[in-house]
Image (spheres, rainbow, N blue to C red):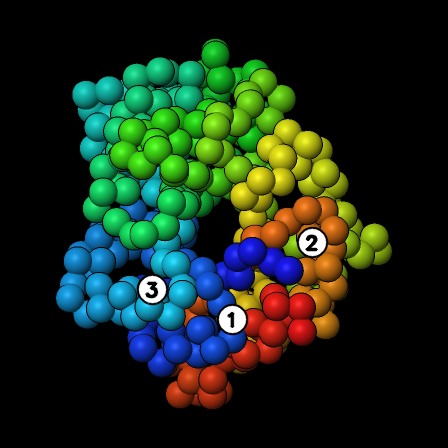
């Protein structure tokens, strides 16, 4: 039996009807995700205002009453270390392949002051986006080819650099919340095993196979894409352990299936694939599974009707 059964949405899709449907479906973990890509900082700034609204807090309270824990799942690095800091501290930021410091994405994880800035930023963000959850999913920037190439960093794989940043995040979070946990997001270029960095206490594995083939089970040996995504999964579990380990999937993510463009397409929910995926992950030791479930709000319902939340929840419950 899964300990946590999740569902991740965009802020604008939260309403009372959705919360009650999630409760009826056995979902006990609701993630709020402002959006990814290059617009992530702008979108999170809007969410910071949305979070404070009376209506939002009332919906969070309803979720809590129904046994659903609300958290935020955000590509938040540009909030924790804003690009505006570049003029005063260019060394905080990554060096590109051409040898130029740039404030566009991520940072220089070999700079201890940059990491401390991120730690303080994580602490402040957790205070601003306060929820009852002790999980804080504050990830690196949602881009590729954005590692640091300075003399100290160039020997480090993107996964090592991502874990160094994640370790800085947990240090800040635990100053505010001693029970805080945060995920190392195995995703894109960080879908690998760090070689020179180990996770600090409170850092767990968050496995997000964005490049998978969703038409076949993740463990299908005939799928080159899925073999690539899972090739080092057991090694990652050996490094991070299974405590708090979470699958962050795309089973019901209509933003991905719609190529992150509105109006949304009709969701092609592959319940057969999801069932086999859940079994695969469970056998590896995962007891916490969730999926992005974006682009399934009011505009989707107006076009196609309700999303298959009940069927999705039943699979997570092993039904």
Who comes first in sequence, dot 3 or dot 2?
Answer: 3
Who comes first in sequence, dot 2 or dot 1?
Answer: 1
Q: Is residue 118 above or below residue 35?
A: above
Residue at (66, 37) in percent of width and height: 237
Q: Is residue 206 above or below residue 303?
A: above
Q: Residues within 10 Å of mark 2 (few under 14, many from 20)?
A: some
In x, y percent, where is residue 204? 53, 37
Residue at (61, 52) in percent of width and height: 287
Residue at (22, 53) in percent of width and height: 48
Q: Outermost residue toward the top?
A: 151
Read off the residue under disc 2. Answer: 282
The Cα atoms of the two marked residues, 2 and 1, are separated by: 18 Å
Q: Residues within 10 Å of mark 3 (few under 14, many from 20)?
A: some
**In this orientation, which residue lies closer to the viewer: 299 or 115?**
115
Residue at (74, 55) in percent of width and height: 280
In x, y percent, where is residue 156? 55, 20
Read off the residue under disc 1. Answer: 26
Look at discs 3 and 2 and give the one toward the viewer: 3
Who comes first in sequence, dot 3 or dot 1?
Answer: 1
Read off the residue under disc 3. Answer: 64
In x, y percent, where is residue 120? 26, 29
Query: Is 118 on the left or on the right of 300, as rendered?
Result: left
Q: Is residue 277 above or below residue 101?
A: below
Kindly state the secondary structure of the residue where label 2 is placed: helix
Kindly state the secondary structure of the residue where label 3 is placed: helix
Q: Report whether residue 116 is seen.
A: yes
Q: Outermost residue toward the right?
A: 222
């Amino acid at each position: 039996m899964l300990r946590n059964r999740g569902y991740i949405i965009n802020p604008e899709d939260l309403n009372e009807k959705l919360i009650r449907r999630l409760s009826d479906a056995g979902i006990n973990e609701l993630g709020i995700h402002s959006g990814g890509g290059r617009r992530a900082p702008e979108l999170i700034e809007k969410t910071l205002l949305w979070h404070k609204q009376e209506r939002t807090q009332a919906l969070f309270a309803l979720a809590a009453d129904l046994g659903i824990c609300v958290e935020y799942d955000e590509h938040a690095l540009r909030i924790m270390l804003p690009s505006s800091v570049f003029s005063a501290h260019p060394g905080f930021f990554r060096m590109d392949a051409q040898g130029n410091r740039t404030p566009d994405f991520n940072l220089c994880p070999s700079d201890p002051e940059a990491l401390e800035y991120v730690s303080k930023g994580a602490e402040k963000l957790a205070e601003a986006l306060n929820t009852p959850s002790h999980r804080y999913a504050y990830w690196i920037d949602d881009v590729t080819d954005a590692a640091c190439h300075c003399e100290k960093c160039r020997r480090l794989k993107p996964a090592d650099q991502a874990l160094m940043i994640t370790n800085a995040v947990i240090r800040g979070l635990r100053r505010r919340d001693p029970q805080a946990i945060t995920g190392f997001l195995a995703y894109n270029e960080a879908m690998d095993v760090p070689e020179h960095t180990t996770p600090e206490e409170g850092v767990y594995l968050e496995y997000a196979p964005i490049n998978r083939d969703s038409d076949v089970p993740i463990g299908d040996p005939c799928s080159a894409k899925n073999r690539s995504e899972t090739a080092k999964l057991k090694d990652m579990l050996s490094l991070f352990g299974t405590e708090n380990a979470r699958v962050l999937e795309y089973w019901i993510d209509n933003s991905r299936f719609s190529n992150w463009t509105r109006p949304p397409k009709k969701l092609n929910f592959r319940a057969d694939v999801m069932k086999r995926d859940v079994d695969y992950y469970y056998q590896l030791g995962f007891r916490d599974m969730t999926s992005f479930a974006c682009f399934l709000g009011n505009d989707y319902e107006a076009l196609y009707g309700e999303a298959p939340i009940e069927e999705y929840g039943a699979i997570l419950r092993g039904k």
